Amino acid sequence: MDQPLLEVRNLKVSFRTEDGVVKAVGGVSFTLSEGETLGIVGESGSGKSVTMMSVMRLIFDPNARFEGEVIYKGKDLMTLSRDQMRKIRGSEIAMIFQDPMTSLNPVYRVGWQISEQIREHEQISKRAAHGRAIELLGAVGIPHPRERVDDYPHHFSGGMRQRVMIAMALSCSPDLLIADEPTTALDVTIQAQILNLIKKLKDDFGSAVILITHDMGVVADIADRVAVMYAGRVVEQGTKRDLFYDAQHPYTWGLLGSIARLDRPRPRRLTAIQGLPPSLITLPGGCAFGPRCPHRWEKCDEVPELTDKVGGGHLDACHLSPGQKRDRRETAIHPELSEESA
Amino acid sequence: MLTFIIRRVLWTLLVMFAITLLVFVIFFKTPGVDPARQIAGRNPSPQVMQEIRHQFGLDRPFPVQYALMMKKIFVTRDLVSYSNQGERVVPEIAAATPATLSLVFGAAVIWVVVAIGMGVAAAVLKGTVLDPLLMIVALIGISIPVFWLGEVVNLITQSRYHDTFLFSWIPPLGYTPFSQNPLLWFQGLVMPWITLSVLYIGFYARVLRASLLEIQNEDYIRTARAKGLSERRVLLRHTLRNSMITFVSLFGLDFGVLVGGGALLTEIVFGIHGVGFLTYQSLTNLDLPVIMATVIYGAFFIVLANALVDIAYARLDPRVRLA
């Protein structure tokens, strides 16, 4: 594939507020090939949602400022007119959101809401659209879709509503599906079902998926490639294997260390990353993670570039050399191992 | 649905019973109020007073008097006014109703249309100078007392500028029934309609704007945008549609109050002999039969409006419908 489906180049998003300019996204770049699944992880406020909302051009705040390029199939979405963008939204790029309880309009039947989207983008009769809605509800695993299509959102449970949202997002067979923490608001058992559904439908519909999450387990389950975000920047990016078995950035180590593992000796406590994320108004000079990083040294006063240091398209933004990192990583992720050997 | 209707009817009866009883008690227990004296006119002899008391049943026990009055209103419909004995109360209210309905319906159409226009415009134009400007206009509308506005309107249209081409088409104060002359009916009501609706336009525009802005931040509006719908469709079919739930519930109640006699000030200023006018007159004369009848009429419309609001609410918001 010579041209990626989506290429984000140095995207910056800032909001003017009373307290100052919030640099929510400070230069994010990544690419996504057709049919690929990219997981974007990071804690709350790391800019993952804002990044994807900006790609969809769904931020209407007059105080928001955007810079950079979002190249989708060779077109820069940031320069499209509102109307051109609207035609892409929902038909070529679809999005599902975090809270299915509030993401559907309470006053319309779910079938109507799905066919509304189909009819917005395709010349199709009301009846045909309604038929498609029934098919889609069946495809996302809602029992008795023929009857449920005329139910209102409040007749559905949270997991079922998220299925409706997925059916709606897939209604025009989009090339790219953006899922913004689709399982965060759901029970753990339902989470697995929804993830499996996204995995299955992604293959059936041939869509690429960008999955925003703060759950490393979700990423491990579904993503081909992973980007880790911190304070509005990507700090590490690579294949799932790269990330889980050869993590390069100390922040990623922190994330991995905070996962409860069943296949290792049980630590006395899970390690947490010390400190708090920086204010996005007054970002620290140099590496944004520096103030919390146990491996900080003189070089960290300079802003690190996101570059390929280990090879194979595995990018990271850390001043340590791969060799230095290898020495520190194991104890950083699994401090209990060093305790045992001591 | 049937249980709903039955419950509503029983509720209406209960409310009307309570209100009439209350009015009756207040009237008879108010110091210095003696119905017989009103009926008798100036300086009656004790014999005449005695006779009147007997004739009107005022010497009977209190509950019997109440029952008698209810009977005269609902069954025989021959209740007469205390201050003007040629006046039959029930037909008089029936005659006054069309005037009130005409006034309130017309004003309601104006206020709903203009308030939606202003509210939507203000919400869409938020961030520009026009939004606060519209809201200040709305606030002024709320603040102007209706009797003052009515008098000013009359001063302009009936007196100072009546002879100019602007207002020469406006007929003298008063109400012409629709059946008599539709054009005159309309011409005579234009100014009262506008006057009555100003307050409600201001109030409803503000309420609608606030509701639209609140709903604009809902997750499902973001979903609607993510679906690729046009801004116009998002606004009308999603945002405004949900705002209508609040809007319609408020509207029903205000409408009921106005039909029930709440348009009194407008009716008086413009000389429209509607139910409000009648209420006003009966209150100034302490004319119990008329007060009683207008109170029953008002209570009936308010309870009816409440029931209609509940039905409309269920139509607008599927979440409150019974399964």
Image (cartoon, rainbow, N blue to C red):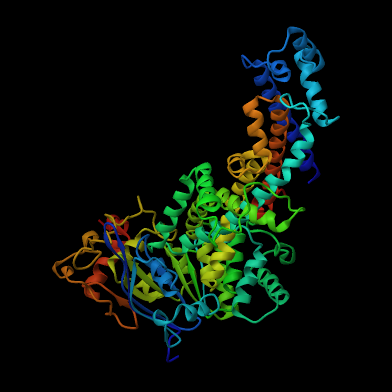
Q: Where does residue B18 sit, x and y in percent of width and height?
A: 70, 27
In the figure, is residue A57 to the left or right of B220?
left
Q: Where does residue A317 sit, x and y in percent of width and height?
A: 27, 73
Q: Where does residue B229 sit, x and y in percent of width and height?
A: 55, 72
| Residue sitting at the far right | B76
Residue A191 higher or lower than B174, as above or below? below
Residue A120 higher or lower than B43, as above or below? below
User: Quick one: B166 or A187, which is closer to the camera?
Assistant: B166
Work out which quarter of the rendered image holds the N terminus of chain A and state it: bottom left
Question: Residue B108, can we see it?
Answer: no
What residue is shown at x 40% (from left), y 58% (from top)?
Answer: B133
User: Quick one: A39 or B160, which is closer to the camera?
Assistant: B160
What residue is shown at x 60% (from left), y 57% (from top)?
Answer: A106
Q: Where does residue A45 sit, x and y in percent of width and height?
A: 35, 61
Residue A206 higher or lower than B8, as above or below? below
What residue is shown at x 63% (from left), y 28% (from top)?
Answer: B283
| Residue sitting at the far left | A298
| Residue sitting at the far bottom | A2
- The mark total stands at 0
User: Quick one: B138 or A4, which is closer to the camera?
Assistant: B138
In the figure, is residue B109 to the left or right of B66?
left
User: Quick one: B139 or B215, which is closer to the camera?
Assistant: B139
Work out which quarter of the rendered image holds the C terminus of chain A and state it: bottom left
Question: Residue A330, can we see it?
Answer: yes
Residue B125 higher or lower than B281, as above or below? below
